[in-house]
Every structure is written in structure tokens, then in C-alpha cells.
Amino acid sequence: MCKLGINIDHVATLRNARGQFHPDPLRAAMILKECKVDSVTMHLREDRRHIKDNDIFLIKDKVDLPINLEIAPTEEMTKIAVRLNPRSVCFVPEKRMEITTEGGLDVKSNMQNIERLLNYFSNSKIEVACFIEPNFNQIDSLKTLGVKTLEFHTGSYADSRTEKILNEKLSLIKEAAQYADELGFNCHAGHGLNYNNVHNIAMIKEIKELNIGHFIIGESIFSGLKNSILKMKEIIKTARK
């Protein structure tokens, strides 16, 4: 089976729009637990634009669900991650002015910094991953660092405007997943996935986990969070058969 993690960042985005307490990300995490998803993903951004420090610690305390914490590769964020002690941490690139994550982390150009930050996790059981483009050079760089889990950025695939481009982007992901799997990586994928485009990604047997957020939260306005999650789970399950 392909596991499913749900990103609840944009429950917090909606809450923060009014500067009050509703909707509550904790309540969303409880619904994820009810739906038996495999993990809850939260991106604690440096500018705290959606999920906040209190959210991640409260959900860790109140909800028995593995946490996948996305963070920028900085010392401040890494120290918070160590205190939280989630199941996994994923280093992602972060630009203050971007609306959403615009691409994968350039591991090859940040080897020294990432290696330094990895030392913080040396005495923990936290699984550390990096969010990268489906690129062989980036995979090789992670191998050199000893990182065993990666998440492929599927945004370029999801944003494809023509079938030709979509198939080209899909082929890149398939080839990169096969290459990474042969090197012993645990492969995840995410960004921009929805009911219409997730099937092709979920069919890639080397990809063991998908992380989906914005679409699920947006769709829940019309269908409810539980229904939106269960429908996504069924599409992924069908693709795996």
C-alpha cells in the first residue's frame, strides 16, 4: 500500500485570517486520526504564516498520530524539531516572499549546512528527509549525506498545461523513483496533487508515501474533511491494485 499523510497547514491559514481560534488545527488532526491516515504533516515556516509552534506541540500531546514536520534547513527550526521529537522531519526550501514552496531543495549546493544540521538528530530516532526535485544529482548528494528518505516535488507534474508536458514530468518522477529505490531510499512524493492527477503518482510502486494538503483542505469546504480524505484514500488504493 501507498501511505497517505495529510498536511493541515491551511486549516491554520484560515484560522489566522481572523486572528482568532477557528478553525482549530487540533480538531482537524483528530479527524485525520478518525480517518486512519498514516501521518499528519505540518510546515512550521520561519514567518509562522500558518502553523505555529503551539499547534505542533499541542497536536503531538493530544493526537496519537505520527507527525511529519516540514522545516527550513536552519538551526532554529532544527532545534524546535528535536524538542518536538516527531516521527519524521523533512527539510524544504523556503523563500519569505513565496506563496507556497516553489521547488525542491538544492541539496548539492547546501551539503555543508545540511550535514551540520543532521548532527542534531544523531541521538534521536527521527527519520530525516529532504524535499527534492526528481533529479539524479540531488539523489546522489543525499546518498553522500547518508539521508535515507526523500520526498519528490510533484509540483511541476501537477502544474503541467499539456498532456505532453505532463507525461514528460511523470517520466522524470518514475525514473528518479526507480533510481532512488535501487540506491535504498525510502521514496515519498507530494505537492499539487488532487483527485485528477494523484492516480499516476500513486501507481509508481517505488513511492511509499504521499503527502497532500492544500487540495484536501480546499475540497473539504464543499465535501467535509472526512469525506475528502476518504475519497483520496480510495483513489490511491485503487491506483495501487
Image (cartoon, rainbow, N blue to C red):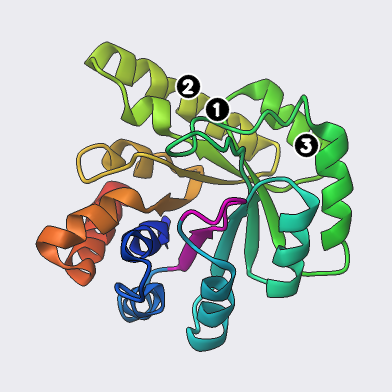
Q: Most extreme residue toward the left, as rendered?
A: 222
Does the image show residue 1?
no
Q: Amino acid at mark 1?
A: Pro
Up the image or down, 174 lies above or below 202; here it is: above
- Residue beneath label 1, please? 134
The numbered mark at residue 172 is 2
* Residue pictured at 86% horizontal, 59% vertical: 120
Report whether 125 appears left or right of 41: right
Locate residue 82, reporting x and y percent: 76, 67
The residue nearer to you, when weighing 215 against 122, is 215
Locate residue 63, reporting x and y percent: 48, 84
All told, the count of numbered labels is: 3
N-terminal-most mark, 2 or 3: 3
Q: Mark 1, residues whose alpha carbon is within 10 Å: few (<14), some, or many (≥20)?
A: many
Q: For marks 2 and 3, give the CA distance.
A: 19 Å
Q: What segment is highlighted magenta in the picture?
A: 38-49
Locate residue 122, reporting x and y percent: 87, 61
What element does badge 1 sit on?
loop
* Residue pictured at 33% horizontal, 50% vertical: 214
| Residue 44 is inside the magenta segment | yes
